Image (spheres, rainbow, N blue to C red):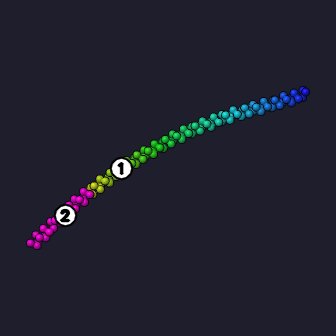
């Protein structure tokens, strides 16, 4: 009977040791899980911040590109209008000269 009691006591001691070991491992894993969750949360925040920074940068670049393109377009339109004016003035001058041409020929012939 005493032998059975000692075996039972040894079994209980082993179970207590195993329980304490498992409890310590659970505590360690719980801490690791908390650390991983914290890191994941930090990475998620960093990602959102970087995403917003890139989006904002993209919007600014897009705005500047639109401004630049509009300036170029406005310049080209102004240049086109100047050319149209020059061509129109040249055309008017040529018409005027062509209208005088018969008069000059008549004056030379007459």
Q: Is residue 49 above or below residue 10?
A: below
Which residue is outermost to the bottom? 109
Disc 1 target residue: 70
Circle 2 — which element?
helix
Q: Residues within 10 Å of mark 1 (few under 14, many from 20)?
A: few
In the image, taking residue 82 as reference, residue 46 lies left or right, namely right
Q: What mark, if any, has residue 47 been given in the picture?
A: none
Relative image position of residue 75 (x, y in whole percent): 32, 52
Q: In which quadrant will I find the C terminus?
A: bottom left
Residue 41 lies in the magenta stretch: no
Identify the mark at residue 95; answer none if there is no mark.
2
The magenta span reads 84-110
* Main SS category, magenta section: helix
In the image, residue 69 sits, relative to residue 17, either above or below, namely below
- Crowding at dot 2, Cα within 10 Å, few <14 / some 14-19 / many 20+, comes out as few
| Left or right, 32 with reference to 53 | right
Q: Quadrant of the N terminus?
A: top right
In the rendered image, residue 85 lying in the magenta stretch gets the answer yes
The quadrant in which residue 7 appears is top right
**Residue 98, image x and y in percent?**
18, 66
Image coordinates of residue 72 in percent, x first then y, are: 35, 52
Residues at marks 1 and 2, CA–CA distance in whole angstroms: 37 Å
Q: Residue at x 75, y 33 (%)?
A: 21
Give the mark, 1 or 2, whose residue is nearer the N terminus: 1
Where 3 falls versus 51 (above or below)? above
Mark 1: secondary structure = helix
């Amino acid at each position: 009977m005493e032998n059975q009691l000692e075996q039972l006591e040894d079994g209980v001691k082993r179970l207590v040791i195993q329980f304490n070991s498992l409890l310590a491992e659970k505590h360690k894993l719980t801490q690791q899980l908390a650390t991983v969750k914290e890191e994941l949360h930090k990475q998620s925040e960093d990602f959102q911040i970087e995403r917003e920074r890139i989006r904002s940068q993209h919007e600014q670049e897009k705005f500047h590109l639109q401004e630049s393109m509009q300036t170029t377009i406005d310049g080209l339109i102004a240049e086109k209008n100047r050319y149209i004016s020059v061509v129109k003035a040249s055309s008017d001058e040529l018409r005027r000269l062509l209208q005088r041409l018969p008069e000059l020929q008549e004056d030379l012939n007459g």
